[in-house]
Structures are given as structure tokens and as C-alpha cells.
Image: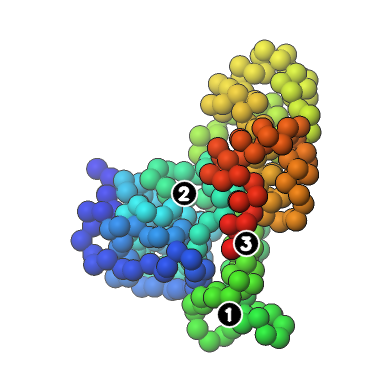
Amino acid sequence: MPVRADQLPEPAAPSPPPGLVTVGRFDQHPGYSVSRPGGADSWLFIWTTGGEGRLAQGAAETDAGARDLVVLGPDVPHHYAVARGARHWAFWWAHCQARPTWTDWLRPYALGDRLYAVTPVPDGVRARLESAFRRMLADARWTGEGPPPEDEPEDGRVAVAHGTTARELALCSLESVVLLATATARGEPNRSGLDVRIRQAEALIAADPGAPHTVESLAAGVSLSASRFAHLFTQQLGRSPMRALLAARLLHAARLLEATDLPVERVAAASGFSSPFHFNRVFRQRYGAPPGAYRAGLRR
């Protein structure tokens, strides 16, 4: 029977307030454990650098060894500890509100109950992720006065980003961690046996979601008939090519709203939407707010 995190007996540990970005690194020994029967108010990202940990969230659970990124979504009971038999567990961690687009990157690695295990990340990416966490810790300590710190401070292992600039810089570093890990990990579940032509079609969509793709043009790009391509794509990915294209366009639009000051109409056009009205409607359905309010909420 899987362990349910809300049935574990350890005393509850508080989580940081949801509006803060908190980052740190620990090297814990056997006996270390954290239990939150009510879950956390924010997302928790854990990047293991040595030893082994054990994490449970709801009814889902996973081990975490070196080069594993495990992400726990909010509001689900969870528990994590040094794995049984392990001599220690060294890891970076960050509590924050995840940017909405990150969930699309994490979705292929979902184990259930908002627990995601991105594993294993190639050894060649390890230094980049380590550097990103070090930068995150340094930026979280910046007060806004003088130049930003060049590297992680030697004193202390935990930092809280209070200022807006420090918070956004820290989130940018964490975003690079999530993107690099999900883009390079070899352990994507539910994708073994995926037809290479469907992978190619996904790559065509991801490379330029704003292009005037159609079922016919995508099928031609992978040397399939339109009917065969649409059937195979839907069968293997669980959604039609046009639904996948819409999701990619909305993700692209959200990134433009986050990273640029382009007017909403230009964001719509650059993301492949010919009708601003249609763009506003489908964007609100996907992200819970119209494009302008989505951008304003991020900046607040």
C-alpha cells in the first residue's frame, strides 16, 4: 500500500508564506524529516546533489537521488525525509509561487497528487543547475542597493527574497532550473514508444507556435497523410494536433506577456491568433484571467 502523506505521524512543519521566494541548501543526516498534513501554501522545488531522500505527497511517492529534481505542488499533504538506509541527503530547495507556464513543462513528469519527479537529469547539465541555484541564493539576498552580488554568500544557507527585483531575479534562476531539467531529463514517463514522426510534429509546433500550422501542413512535414497523422497524434498524445497547437500558442503568449511590454494585440498576432477577441477568450479559459490582467497580476 502506498504511504499517504496525511497519515504520517511526524509533527507538522510550517511552510513559508505563499508570497515569498525562499531558497536554501541543506545536507541532512538520518532522522531529518518534514511533515505538512495540510500541505504547503506554495510550491516546493528540491534538487538533490548527494545522498538520497524519500518524498510522499498524498498517495504519490518517490525517491530522490543525485541529479533528481522533485517538485511538490501546494495544498496537498506531504512528507519528506532522508531515505531509509541513506547516510545523508544533500539538496537545494526553493519555496515560491510557480509561474503558470512551468506546469506545462512539468506535466510529463507527474506522478499524481501534484508530485513531479524529473529524473534523471544528464550529468552534463548538473553544473548549470548548481550554478542557477547558487545565483538564486545570491540574488535573493540583494537589497537593491549597489550592484547585485556576484556569487552565493559564504555565510548562511537560506535566503528570503523580499524586494521585487530580488524576487524576480530569483524566479528567473529557478525558471532556468525547471526548463533545463524538464528539457533534458531522460526519464519522461508515458512517452516510451512514441512514434518519431509525432515527436517531430511536436518539435515543429514548439519551434514556432505562431506559424500558420494546419493538420495538413504538419502531416506533410512528417511525411504522413493528414488523416493518418491526426489519428496517430491523437492516439499517442491524447489530444488532437489542433488542441496541442492551441496549448502551445497560449503558452507562447503567456511567455510574451511575462517577458515583454508588447501590446496584447501584438502578443495575439505573434502567437498565431488572428482574432483578438478569440485570443482573449481562450487565454482566460486557460489561465483564469484575460491577457492584460494576467500581465498586471504578475507585476503586482
**x and y, in percent, of residue 213 in the image:** 76, 27
Q: CA distance from mark 2 to mark 1?
A: 28 Å
Quadrant containing the C terminus is bottom right
Q: Residue at x 71, y 56 (%)?
A: 259
Q: Residue at x 62, y 67 (%)?
A: 168
What residue sits right under mark 2 in the picture? 116
Q: Which mark is residue 141?
A: 1
- Looking at the picture, which amino acid does disc 1 mark? Arg
Mark 1: secondary structure: loop
- Looking at the picture, which amino acid does disc 3 mark? Arg
**x and y, in percent, of residue 7 in the image:** 22, 53
- Looking at the picture, which amino acid does disc 2 mark? Tyr
What residue sits right under mark 3 in the picture? 299
Mark 3: secondary structure: helix
Q: Please name whichever residue, 122 or 71, is drawn nearer the observer in this view of the structure.
A: 71
Mark 2: secondary structure: strand
